[in-house]
Image (cartoon, grey):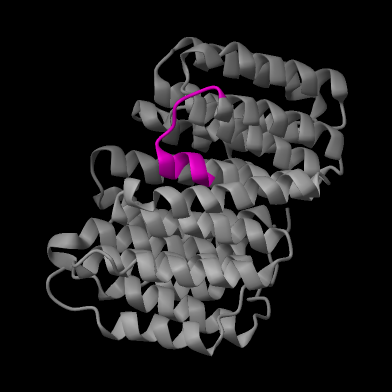
Amino acid sequence: MKSAVSISDQPLAEYQIKLLELAFQTASAIPKNPHIKDRSRAQEAVVMACLKLEQPGRAAQYCQGIDDWRRGLCYAELAFYYAKRGAVEMAREYLNQAQQICDEAQDWRKDTIRVKIAGVLVLLGQNDQANQYEIGVVDSQKGKVAGIRAMQCDEGAFEEQMQTLASLGKEGGFDILQNVQQAYALLFNRFYSDMQRRDRIEQEMKSLWNTMPYFVRMELLMTLAGFALNHGDSVKALELVQEADTFLKDSQWRLDHRISMMASLSAIRFKAGDTTTARNDCDAAHALFDAQRLSIVNIDRARTLHKLAEAYQVMGDTRTALLVYKKAVEEGVENPNSRPRAEDLSAACCSLVLSAVEPDAELWTRLNQIREGLSQPW
């Protein structure tokens, strides 16, 4: 790994920059007292959007505005970003900042940062030190570093990695099993071209499913389908989507979750080439929202619509995506309190920028009106 690599923010369209700024300003408008948790969580989401858009400098700038332990977590995410790209010096710089905040954090928050730091150390080749950071962490964090090791796993370490995950899986507990499944998924991606190993990993994953809820199984199947698409395997992607669709149809779901899942599946199905079914399913999800809107709690409506808008954009229908985003923005102001309004507005901006949907004049006006109108009661 090279020690000196220069990485700068990639060019963005002006509207994307404006959306990121509006998202972070809105999140930061939430009062620290008594809403520091919600404020920081919304700010973190903007930082993560920046990293997805190859904007580490902007992400670092936003990190400075986070006032609790999540600043340390975001610094660790920045370190991970740089380490993954071979920029060792920058990775170490942010690793140090993450460590300083980690030292002051408590309980599971401390462990969350420690595990992310451990993942960075794995990427930097410091496995012994990474092991020290994993010792004694809470169950919700156990097995997460195994996923990073799966990303790095070479041919000779495959069996050892499989044994490690199998041992972790035997510990039981929902959080550990979920982390193990995510690690298996990354190993599935790492060895995708080796069909025998890939099939073995998939079977190991499914052998652990009996105790896991359907929504977790569906999310894992969609993750695997996404990896299949990345490898140009539309046939496998559609197979996995169909399996997920069976879970969706054969079980009971809260309405907002059902609609969100339908939208996400339709987007993957479209990318895999089944464009007609994808569009029909997305339209059906949209119609279901309109028909049973009042059955969904008002604080859940906007983000449900974000999923639909994102799916329409994947299908190349920016016009419908924009219409759904406008509907989502209005749903976001149904709550009389400004905190959930701010959360929904910031989330809408992040979704718009990540989907590359440019607001028209009408939507820009409305976004700014909502931002300016945030006030008591929070």
Q: Is residue 329 visible?
A: yes
* Residue nearest the viewer, comparing 342 with 260: 260
Residue 132, given in percent of the width and then of the height, sits at 44, 32
111 versus 352 height, above or below: above
Q: Is residue 143 among what the camera can see?
A: no
Q: Quadrant of the C terminus?
A: bottom left
Relative depth, front residue between 157 and 240: 240
> How far across and how far down the image is residue 228, in percent?
78, 38
Q: Which of the two residues, 3 or 282, is positioned nearer the viewer here?
A: 282
Of residue 192 and residue 220, the one placed in the foreground of this image is 220
* Residue extending farthest front: 291
Magenta span includes 120: no
The quarter of the displayed image where residue 115 is located? top left
Q: Position of residue 75 (x, y in %)?
A: 44, 60
Q: Image check: 372 left or right of 63?
A: left
Q: Quadrant of residue 22?
A: bottom left
- Residue drawn at x 41%, y 26% is 175
Q: What's drawn in magenta, residue-wise?
A: 250-260
Residue plotted at (57% across, 31% down)? 218
Rendered location of residue 293, percent (x, y): 39, 52
Relative to residue 99, is residue 138 depicted above or below? above
Q: Residue at x 62, y 55 (%)?
A: 83
The residue that appears at 34% across and 75% down in the rendered structure is 26
**Total marks placed:** 0
Does residue 113 appear to the left or right of 144 in the view shown?
left
233 displayed left or right of 369? right
